[in-house]
Image: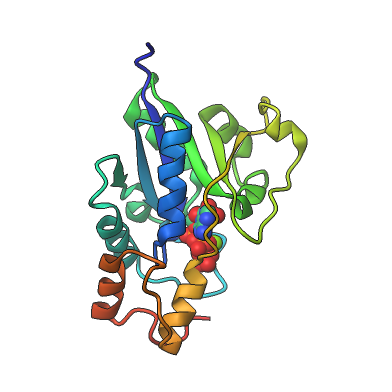
Amino acid sequence: MSTTVRLGVMGGTFDPVHYGHLVAAEEALAQFHLDRVVFMPTGRPVRKTHRSVSSAEDRYLMTVVATASNPDFSVSRIEIDRAGDTYTVDTMLQMRKESGEGAELFFITGADAVREILGWRGADRLAELCTFIAATRPGYEADFPSEAVEGGGPRLPKVEHMEVPALAISSSDIRDRVAAGRPVRYLLPESVSAYIEKTGLYRAPTR
Ligand code: ATP
Ligand code: MG
């Protein structure tokens, strides 16, 4: 049996974290025999400049309370503690450094986000660092060059597909619901909705 550590990284804005994220991470753990999944809230998301994103600390804390009961999940502060723009390649380089050469890294992402990967800064470097796990997401087709699916290459990340139970849940919809006073129960952990209520997050429309 191999002793290589298989480490999943679930990147996201998590504004707020919801059951779509948690189910995708849990499925990746099982389907790809990962040892653990590290949730990685983004610092200043490069690609989400069109709306104001909640503070890194709020997003970090919501992710912590949402994952607290799962011994295989943890949350990293790497991105939120880094000054300046967030680039996935820098994060994965640091994860590689921290986890050692023996670890195998996986970046878990939804079908909508994987399409952007090929255009990301350092996509060729990312190809050497990790395998991408693309989760199905209702309403989104995963469409990217077939070379990426067929095992990657020197410049194209390797992308593995993963079927997850379809959950048409998004953070944007949850924010809209909170702003409109509509229910969010059963869309995200109760600990997270309690945090939202306590802090007054999303009460005013955010977009
Ligand atoms: P927003 O609506 O603000 O864009 P979001 O719900 O898409 O938020 P993100 O933090 O942007 O959440 O997502 C982080 C990662 O989780 C992305 O890779 C995204 O594709 C994936 N993801 C989000 N929701 C789901 C879902 N319901 N099913 C599968 N993957 C999901
Ligand atoms: Mg999104």
Residue found at x 37% / y 29%? 97
> Ligand 2 sits in which quadrant?
bottom right
What is the x, y in percent for residue 59? 34, 64
Residue found at x 44% / y 54%? 21
- Residue 202 visible? The answer is yes
Residue found at x 59% / y 55%? 137
Residue found at x 51% / y 74%? 173
108 or 51: nearer the viewer: 108
113 or 92: nearer the viewer: 113
Is 163 drawn above or below residue 166 in the view shown?
Answer: above
What is the x, y in percent for residue 179? 43, 86
Q: How is the image coloured?
A: rainbow
- Residue 45 visible? The answer is no
Q: Is residue 205 left or right of residue 150?
A: left
What is the x, y in percent for residue 141? 70, 53
Is 90 drawn above or below residue 188 in the view shown?
Answer: above
141 or 97: nearer the viewer: 141
Quarter of the rendering occupied by the N terminus: top left
What is the x, y in percent for residue 140? 66, 57
Is 132 drawn above or below residue 25 in the view shown?
Answer: above
177 or 30: nearer the viewer: 30
